Amino acid sequence: MAVRGALVNWENSMYKMALNCVATWMVLWMLPIPRGFGQVSPAFPAAKTGGNYMHNYYLPPPSTTPWYPAWSPNGEEIAFSMQGSIWKIRLGTTTACELTAAATYDSSPAWSPDGRWIVYTAEDDSRDISLRILNLSTGATSALTSGTDINVDPVWSADGERIAYVSTRDDGWFNIFVMPITDGKAGELTRLTTADDYGKDRLYFGRKDLHIEPTWSPDGKEIIFLSNHGIPLGSGALWRMPAEPLGMAKATMIRREETLYRTRPDWSPDGTRIIYSSHQGGQYDNLFVLPVSGGEPYKMTFGDWDHFCPRWSPDGRRIVYVSNQHGLTELRILEAFGGAETKVEIAEKRYRRPMGRLEVRVNDAETHRTTAARIYVRASDGKTYTPNDAYHRVGRAGEHLFHTSGTSTLRAPAGPMRIEAVKGFEYWPAASEVTIRANEVTRLTLNLARMSHMAAQGWYSGSMHVHMNYGGTLHNTPENLMKMAAAEDMPVIGELIANKDNRILDYQFFRGELDPHSTKDRLLYFNEEYRPPWYGHISLLNLTAHLISPFTTGYEGTAIESLYPSNTDILRLAHAQGAIGGYVHPYQKEPSEAEYAGARGLPVDVALGTVDYLELMSGSDHIATSRVWHRILNCGFKIPVVGGEDSISNLYRTALVGVNRTYAYLGARLDWQGWIEAIRKGRTFATNGPLLEFNIDGKEEGEEIHLPAQGKRVSVRARMISIVPVEKAEILNNGKVVEALPLRDDAKSAELTKEIDVRKSGWYTLRVYGTHAVHPVDDPYPFAESSPIYVHCGGRPIRSEEDARYFLTWIDAISRMAAEDRGWRSEGEKAHVLSQFQEARKVFEQRLREAQP
């Protein structure tokens, strides 16, 4: 047993300095600010399909570096998006010229065949995306669409009289429309597709069909596009249809493969083939050519990185595309015959508005050394600008940001700028306002004052749910993952190798031991997420021999559609390697209201002793998940909690690494096996910001107290400190609030020392939370909860009749569901899994009997 010291010394001079820093920070961030700070609103609400994967794989990113190229009609220039604007560059030069500059994030240029116009997308910061048209002679832009819809994928017909594009207009589903264009003005629309009903929900895609990414035939009579019409998995197949009203009715499929939005077909100028991007079951997207009538694709690029957005040159001899070989994206040109490849170098940028330069340095206020951090920037136009070597990110809360190693330089429009540095949960954020002056350099140092030092008390933080590469625009590496964790002040990275549909990402990094990039201060271990949609996803930590296949089950229309093996089987295989396992991102609401989806198999594995922890905080609702967890504890099962945000860290729009994390007590030394043992023993708490200290009679999380049968008074000590204000700090006993910690005036700290009466066996946790989003917590609301301290009176077990019945109902429901499932390969498989369910049921029946008087 180790009783930690205070989270912070209240009279410490550094703490007083920190309060002054945070007071300044609060004043700055109470000033009027653009929408997005401190709010969590659904991104792109007009779209009824897709969610996070659609946002990242399909919609245009606000990229620091080049994205979405388009040729000029004469083949001498390329237009592209970069830093939220449309740019062009003349081949053979290294100077890029900015063509648009607005408060929107502009992307997806399409150059008209006569060279006079560029149609492009303009995103109103996660709310809607409109089409605009740029007059290249005058520089003026005007709107082609209006309203709050998503309008993307513009492409000109060869005669320059029409554009085809994709819109959610009318019904919220992605469909293809044709818009006549006369002298830069939009004409009456023609709808080519409708959202047919598949008949049931599809994994990640729902019931309604989507139709996206059109490309015209050279004669303007046909369109090739992507659609999941009649297809159970992925964004669909390549189809060909006449460019006429409701042409989908006459469409024919020319290539069926499992896609994920990245396809971007482009019809060749000679009309015989298309170029497109495909992963074809591998980790990375490469370029392929395919006859327009169908047939076998032929691979054009090779490499362990991605190749996106291919476009034929007007003469058909070259292909421009986007590569992420070196991490961030860059433009490359591939000779269609000969294979020579050239990078489009950008050495100089010519802006169409006054720009200045910001040099920012982040220091640790105590050591005066530079330190890595998360950076928020809002320029005078309301947008975020990032350094050339930084990945532009949008967090779970919808806020734009980047990570710095300590010093960064960026360009931004002249005018006022707000900038903030954030470093994990143990430093107060630091913010400032500066004025950017045209053609000048502004220098700023932000000092981060330490709020707490948990490692000094033996407590270390880590995320148990990080993905490195997952089909995003960034080609991520272990080195970069370590830098991101440093910026978020997180010593432990539990990376999870996983499938995304029919491919396995980052499997080559598995070692069965710490990754060699680990240091004495930061640990990286490649683990596994096993992702069956029916049972619920589980993480497997500390695998030492090999990854566990088939990585998932229950995928409709595949050879792994069966619900065999069960999660129980997989968890037992993991245990045989010395690993631990638990359910991740479990519930968005009360499970019985959603057919127990999210972590459907949880009570089975709790009863059978195969689950070691529950990921209380992740991409799910913390309160809804905690209610289920409390019921489990009430039945006498000792299940600790961990946190892991499910950061897919090479996506631009994702939860940030470490925003939901685990704190575990390791003592004097950071050690991977110590970390695993701390989770096994329940020496943990999960948090997205608030830091906890909790003990009863000197016992901490995961420990037990044994009292006489009649019970006795015990001494409770609870403390909380947080970088953001909270609304409640409470001690729970068997899920009910028994004590409230009085919050200090700023609602960022609380403390309670009190004796309480204990008369029956039970568990106790410390919970802290708010009810709304608070910047810079990248989550819907602040939250933290400790693993339990267990108190036993007279050796009596912890039992609940109500909660035992709850889980019996649950197991009965999923047993019926499993029995009716059509994916079983044999009766033997079904019998095996159903017998596990019945074995778990017997355990809860026994707990029910023990709960009754």
Image: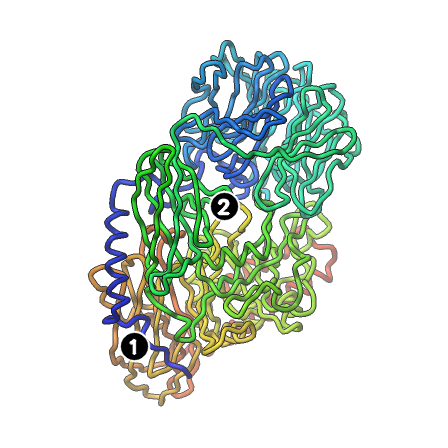
Quarter holding residue 162? top right
**Closer to the camera in the image, 452 or 568:** 452
* Whole-percent x, y for residue 167 in the image: 51, 27
Residue for point 61% across, 42% down:
324
Q: Which residue is mark 1?
A: 717
Sequence order check, earlier mark of 2 and 1: 2
Residue lying furthest left: 745
| Viewport quadrant of the N terminus | bottom left
Q: Nearer the viewer, residue 191 or 492?
A: 492
* Res. 830 visible in picture: no
Residue 689 seen: yes
Q: Quadrant of the C terminus?
A: bottom left
Q: Residues within 10 Å of mark 1 (few under 14, many from 20)?
A: some
Q: Going 55% across and 54% down the picture, which residue do you hit?
A: 480
Q: Judging from the image, what secondary structure is the residue with disc 2 in?
A: loop
Relative horizontal placement of residue 354, taking residue 62 as reference (left or right): left
Measuring from the top left, give residue 239's x and y in whole percent. Answer: 68, 28
Residue 388 % position (x, y): 50, 41
* Residue at image coords 56%, 29%: 195
From mark 2 to mark 1, how far is it between C-alphas? 44 Å
Marks 2/1 in contact by CB < 8 Å: the verdict is no
Amino acid carrying label 2: it is: Ala
- How many marks can you see? 2
- Is 172 on the left-hand or right-hand side of 369? right
Q: Amino acid type of disc 1?
A: Arg
Give x and y (percent) for residue 196.
Answer: 58, 30
713 vs 658, left or right, is: left
Residue wearing tag 2: 390
Under circle 1, the secondary element is strand
